[in-house]
Amino acid sequence: MKCGSLRLVLPIMLTACATAPIVGGTYSGSYFYNFEFAYLTPVGKDERWCVDGDMSSAELPDGWGTSDVVVQGVVEPVGHYGNLGACQRIIKVTKVLQVKDRRGRG
């Protein structure tokens, strides 16, 4: 009986582990934003992470530009996120630690 229960529970446990987000951490990179889209290109990675969270301290008032940031947050598993699947991951930003070199679209 115990063996049968294990066969039922084990696949559920493995599925839960496969979809769990990466543990929170500190990430730095180039932050791009405009009126409909925002993403982070992390330092040392050739990918975009859609941003979920308050990044207003890294943005200019006109609502379009880039800045170099250091943020704390939780990164979701690899997938297709954002406009037409443009992002490989989502970062749920919990805190903006540093902002440098805010630039407008010009």
Image (cartoon, rainbow, N blue to C red):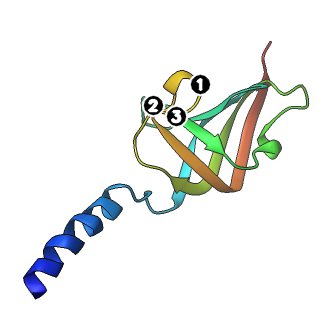
The type of residue carrying mark 1 is Asn
Horizontal side of residue 45 vs 61, given as left or right = left
* Label 1 CA crowd tier, 10 Å (few <14, some 14–19, many 20+): few
The reply to whether discs 2 and 1 touch (Cβ–Cβ < 8 Å) is: no
Mark 3 and mark 2: span between their CA atoms? 12 Å
Q: Which residue is mark 1?
A: 83
Q: Is residue 18 left or right of residue 3?
A: right
List the residue tagged with mark 2.
47
As shown in the figure, which amino acid type bears the numbered disc 2?
Glu
Q: In the image, residue 53 lies at what x, y percent?
A: 70, 49
Residue at 84% over, 28% down: 63
Q: Secondary structure at mark 2?
A: loop
From this view, report whether residue 8 is shown above or below residue 86. Answer: below
Cβ atoms under marks 3 and 2 closer than 8 Å: no
Residue at which label 3 appears: 81
Element under label 3?
A: loop
As drawn, 105 above or below 90: above
Answer with mark 2 or mark 1, whichever residue precedes in sequence: 2
Q: CA distance from mark 1 to mark 3?
A: 7 Å
